[in-house]
Amino acid sequence: IAGITQAPTSQILAAGRRMTLRCTQDMRHNAMYWYRQDLGLGLRLIHYSNTAGTTGKGEVPDGYSVSRANTDDFPLTLASAVPSQTSVYFCASSDSVAPDTQYFGPGTRLTVL
Amino acid sequence: AQSVTQPDIHITVSEGASLELRCNYSYGATPYLFWYVQSPGQGLQLLLKYFSGDTLVQGIKGFEAEFKRSQSSFNLRKPSVHWSDAAEYFCAVGGVYSGGGADGLTFGKGTHLIIQP
Protein backbone atom coordinates (compact mmCIF):
# COMPACT_ATOMS: atom_id res chain seq x y z
CA ILE A 1 0.00 0.00 0.00
CA ALA A 2 1.58 3.27 -1.10
CA GLY A 3 -0.63 5.58 0.96
CA ILE A 4 -0.09 9.09 -0.34
CA THR A 5 2.30 9.96 -3.12
CA GLN A 6 3.40 13.46 -4.04
CA ALA A 7 5.21 14.72 -7.09
CA PRO A 8 7.62 16.21 -7.72
CA THR A 9 9.87 15.57 -4.71
CA SER A 10 11.46 18.96 -5.20
CA GLN A 11 11.31 21.77 -7.71
CA ILE A 12 13.03 25.07 -8.39
CA LEU A 13 10.73 27.50 -10.15
CA ALA A 14 11.11 30.97 -11.59
CA ALA A 15 8.79 33.61 -10.20
CA GLY A 16 5.73 34.13 -12.35
CA ARG A 17 5.62 30.55 -13.60
CA ARG A 18 2.68 28.25 -13.14
CA MET A 19 3.19 25.07 -11.16
CA THR A 20 1.01 22.13 -10.19
CA LEU A 21 1.90 19.89 -7.28
CA ARG A 22 0.40 16.45 -7.56
CA CYS A 23 -1.08 14.35 -4.78
CA THR A 24 -2.58 10.88 -5.09
CA GLN A 25 -3.90 8.60 -2.36
CA ASP A 26 -4.87 4.95 -2.64
CA MET A 27 -6.72 4.62 0.65
CA ARG A 28 -10.09 5.76 -0.74
CA HIS A 29 -10.22 8.48 1.89
CA ASN A 30 -12.97 11.04 1.58
CA ALA A 31 -11.11 14.10 2.79
CA MET A 32 -7.84 15.55 1.51
CA TYR A 33 -5.76 18.53 2.55
CA TRP A 34 -2.83 20.66 1.49
CA TYR A 35 -0.50 22.19 4.05
CA ARG A 36 2.63 24.26 3.77
CA GLN A 37 5.43 23.97 6.29
CA ASP A 38 7.72 26.89 6.98
CA LEU A 39 10.51 27.05 9.52
CA GLY A 40 9.24 28.34 12.82
CA LEU A 41 5.64 28.42 11.66
CA GLY A 42 4.66 24.76 11.75
CA LEU A 43 2.12 23.53 9.22
CA ARG A 44 -0.64 25.74 7.91
CA LEU A 45 -3.67 24.57 5.98
CA ILE A 46 -3.98 25.92 2.43
CA HIS A 47 -7.03 24.15 1.02
CA TYR A 48 -9.09 21.12 1.82
CA SER A 49 -11.68 18.88 0.21
CA ASN A 50 -14.41 17.02 2.06
CA THR A 51 -15.22 14.77 -0.86
CA ALA A 52 -14.79 14.58 -4.61
CA GLY A 53 -16.27 17.65 -6.27
CA THR A 54 -15.98 19.97 -3.25
CA THR A 55 -13.14 22.16 -2.02
CA GLY A 56 -12.67 24.82 0.61
CA LYS A 57 -10.18 27.42 1.79
CA GLY A 58 -7.94 26.95 4.76
CA GLU A 59 -5.82 29.40 6.70
CA VAL A 60 -3.51 30.55 3.86
CA PRO A 61 -5.32 30.05 0.52
CA ASP A 62 -4.17 33.15 -1.38
CA GLY A 63 -2.19 32.37 -4.53
CA TYR A 64 -3.24 28.72 -4.57
CA SER A 65 -6.06 26.76 -6.16
CA VAL A 66 -7.15 23.14 -5.94
CA SER A 67 -9.51 20.76 -7.67
CA ARG A 68 -10.97 17.40 -6.69
CA ALA A 69 -12.24 15.68 -9.79
CA ASN A 70 -12.11 12.22 -8.20
CA THR A 71 -11.48 10.58 -4.84
CA ASP A 72 -7.81 9.81 -5.35
CA ASP A 73 -6.28 13.00 -6.73
CA PHE A 74 -5.97 16.46 -5.21
CA PRO A 75 -3.62 18.72 -7.20
CA LEU A 76 -2.47 22.09 -5.89
CA THR A 77 -1.80 24.83 -8.45
CA LEU A 78 0.23 27.99 -8.10
CA ALA A 79 -1.01 30.15 -10.96
CA SER A 80 1.87 32.64 -10.81
CA ALA A 81 4.51 31.66 -8.28
CA VAL A 82 6.10 34.22 -5.96
CA PRO A 83 9.17 33.83 -3.72
CA SER A 84 7.01 33.81 -0.57
CA GLN A 85 5.58 30.51 -1.77
CA THR A 86 8.94 28.86 -1.22
CA SER A 87 8.07 26.13 1.25
CA VAL A 88 7.63 22.44 1.80
CA TYR A 89 4.16 21.30 0.79
CA PHE A 90 2.42 18.33 2.35
CA CYS A 91 -0.67 16.59 1.14
CA ALA A 92 -2.76 14.64 3.64
CA SER A 93 -5.92 12.59 3.70
CA SER A 94 -8.38 11.30 6.26
CA ASP A 95 -11.21 8.83 6.10
CA SER A 96 -13.84 11.29 7.32
CA VAL A 97 -14.31 14.99 7.55
CA ALA A 98 -14.76 14.90 11.30
CA PRO A 99 -11.53 15.55 13.20
CA ASP A 100 -9.76 12.34 12.36
CA THR A 101 -6.30 10.97 11.89
CA GLN A 102 -4.68 12.52 8.87
CA TYR A 103 -2.11 10.59 6.88
CA PHE A 104 0.63 12.63 5.27
CA GLY A 105 2.57 12.31 2.07
CA PRO A 106 6.36 12.72 1.92
CA GLY A 107 6.19 16.36 0.85
CA THR A 108 7.33 18.53 -2.05
CA ARG A 109 10.09 21.04 -1.51
CA LEU A 110 9.42 24.07 -3.70
CA THR A 111 11.82 26.96 -4.22
CA VAL A 112 10.62 30.03 -6.10
CA LEU A 113 13.38 32.33 -7.30
CA ALA B 1 -10.47 30.38 16.27
CA GLN B 2 -8.48 27.46 17.57
CA SER B 3 -4.78 27.66 18.30
CA VAL B 4 -1.98 25.48 19.59
CA THR B 5 1.05 26.63 21.55
CA GLN B 6 4.19 24.60 21.95
CA PRO B 7 6.25 26.78 24.28
CA ASP B 8 9.55 24.97 23.78
CA ILE B 9 11.20 25.46 20.40
CA HIS B 10 14.13 23.20 21.28
CA ILE B 11 14.58 20.60 24.00
CA THR B 12 17.76 18.66 24.73
CA VAL B 13 17.52 15.42 26.67
CA SER B 14 20.11 12.80 27.53
CA GLU B 15 19.55 9.33 26.15
CA GLY B 16 17.69 7.24 28.71
CA ALA B 17 16.22 10.25 30.48
CA SER B 18 12.52 11.03 30.66
CA LEU B 19 10.85 13.48 28.33
CA GLU B 20 7.89 15.82 28.48
CA LEU B 21 6.89 18.06 25.58
CA ARG B 22 4.33 20.71 26.36
CA CYS B 23 1.25 21.57 24.34
CA ASN B 24 -1.48 24.05 25.17
CA TYR B 25 -4.51 24.55 22.99
CA SER B 26 -7.36 26.98 22.61
CA TYR B 27 -10.59 25.61 21.22
CA GLY B 28 -14.20 26.50 21.84
CA ALA B 29 -15.64 23.01 21.93
CA THR B 30 -14.44 19.52 22.76
CA PRO B 31 -10.99 19.29 21.24
CA TYR B 32 -9.63 16.47 19.17
CA LEU B 33 -5.92 16.39 19.90
CA PHE B 34 -3.00 14.83 18.12
CA TRP B 35 0.75 14.45 18.38
CA TYR B 36 2.75 13.91 15.22
CA VAL B 37 6.45 13.28 14.77
CA GLN B 38 8.55 14.34 11.79
CA SER B 39 12.00 12.92 11.17
CA PRO B 40 14.38 14.99 9.04
CA GLY B 41 13.27 15.14 5.41
CA GLN B 42 10.21 13.03 6.10
CA GLY B 43 6.48 13.49 6.30
CA LEU B 44 4.51 13.45 9.51
CA GLN B 45 3.66 10.29 11.40
CA LEU B 46 0.90 10.06 13.98
CA LEU B 47 2.13 9.21 17.48
CA LEU B 48 -1.19 9.28 19.30
CA LYS B 49 -4.56 11.00 19.45
CA TYR B 50 -7.26 11.91 21.93
CA PHE B 51 -10.90 12.08 20.98
CA SER B 52 -12.73 11.18 24.20
CA GLY B 53 -12.67 8.78 27.14
CA ASP B 54 -9.57 8.01 29.16
CA THR B 55 -7.51 11.16 29.41
CA LEU B 56 -4.22 9.25 29.35
CA VAL B 57 -3.61 7.91 25.88
CA GLN B 58 -0.92 5.53 24.74
CA GLY B 59 0.77 5.82 21.39
CA ILE B 60 3.45 4.24 19.32
CA LYS B 61 7.14 4.10 20.19
CA GLY B 62 6.44 4.17 23.92
CA PHE B 63 4.90 7.65 23.97
CA GLU B 64 1.90 8.70 26.00
CA ALA B 65 -0.01 11.94 26.46
CA GLU B 66 -2.41 13.24 29.06
CA PHE B 67 -5.37 15.46 28.28
CA LYS B 68 -6.06 18.01 31.03
CA ARG B 69 -9.13 20.03 30.23
CA SER B 70 -8.69 22.37 33.20
CA GLN B 71 -5.25 23.35 31.95
CA SER B 72 -6.04 23.16 28.22
CA SER B 73 -3.01 20.97 27.86
CA PHE B 74 -2.04 17.79 26.07
CA ASN B 75 1.56 17.10 27.06
CA LEU B 76 3.55 14.29 25.48
CA ARG B 77 5.72 12.06 27.65
CA LYS B 78 8.15 9.21 27.35
CA PRO B 79 9.85 7.57 30.34
CA SER B 80 13.15 6.85 28.60
CA VAL B 81 14.21 8.39 25.30
CA HIS B 82 16.30 6.72 22.64
CA TRP B 83 18.63 8.40 20.16
CA SER B 84 16.14 7.53 17.42
CA ASP B 85 13.57 9.82 19.07
CA ALA B 86 15.45 12.88 17.84
CA ALA B 87 12.95 14.62 15.56
CA GLU B 88 10.45 17.45 15.33
CA TYR B 89 7.24 16.99 17.31
CA PHE B 90 3.98 18.69 16.48
CA CYS B 91 0.86 19.00 18.55
CA ALA B 92 -2.38 19.60 16.65
CA VAL B 93 -6.03 20.25 17.37
CA GLY B 94 -8.98 19.39 15.16
CA GLY B 95 -11.17 22.29 14.18
CA VAL B 96 -13.49 23.82 11.66
CA TYR B 97 -12.25 26.66 9.54
CA SER B 98 -14.41 29.75 9.19
CA GLY B 99 -16.61 29.59 6.14
CA GLY B 100 -15.94 25.91 5.69
CA GLY B 101 -17.34 22.67 6.90
CA ALA B 102 -14.36 20.41 6.90
CA ASP B 103 -11.96 19.88 9.69
CA GLY B 104 -8.37 20.55 8.93
CA LEU B 105 -5.87 20.50 11.74
CA THR B 106 -4.30 23.47 13.45
CA PHE B 107 -0.69 22.72 14.28
CA GLY B 108 1.67 24.15 16.82
CA LYS B 109 5.00 25.44 15.59
CA GLY B 110 6.79 22.34 16.72
CA THR B 111 9.41 21.30 19.27
CA HIS B 112 12.78 20.15 18.06
CA LEU B 113 14.05 17.30 20.24
CA ILE B 114 17.78 16.75 20.51
CA ILE B 115 19.12 13.62 22.19
CA GLN B 116 22.49 13.79 23.87
CA PRO B 117 24.50 10.57 24.14
Image (cartoon, coloured by chain):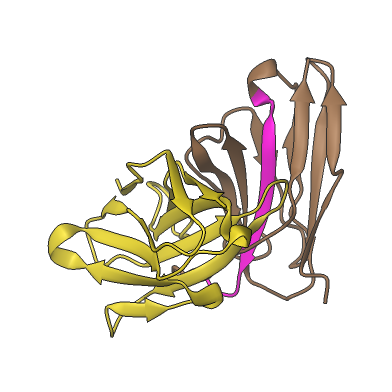
Chain colours: A brown, B yellow
User: Can residue B110 be seen from the camera position used here?
Assistant: yes
For the view shown, which residue lies furthest in the bottom direction?
B53
Q: Quadrant of the N terminus of chain A?
A: bottom right
Quadrant location of the C terminus of chain A in the rendered image: top right
Q: Is residue A2 left or right of residue B80?
A: right
Identified at 75% across, 54% down, the residue is: A106
Position of residue A15 relative to residue B88, above or below, is above
Left or right: A68 in relation to A19: left
Q: Residue furthest left?
A: B70
Residue stretch rendered in magenta on the structure: A85-98
Residue at (28% x, 53% y) in the render: B25
Left-right relation of B41 to A34: right
A79 or A45, nearer to the observer: A45
Of residues B38 and A25, the one nearer the viewer is: B38
**Relative horizontal placement of residue B39, taking residue B81 as reference (left or right):** right
Residue A53: give x, y in percent of width and height. Answer: 67, 60
Q: How many marks?
A: 0
Check the image and name the residue furthest to the front: B117
- Can residue B105 be spotted in the picture? no
Where is residue A83, by image quadrant? top right
Front in this rendered view, residue B18 or A13 = B18
Residue A16: x %, y % from top left:
79, 15
- Near-viewer residue (B81 or B8): B81
For residue A95: magenta? yes
| Residue at the (38%, 57%) spot, across then down | B95
Determine whether A65 is above or below B60 in the image.
above
Residue B44 in the image: x percent, y percent? 62, 57
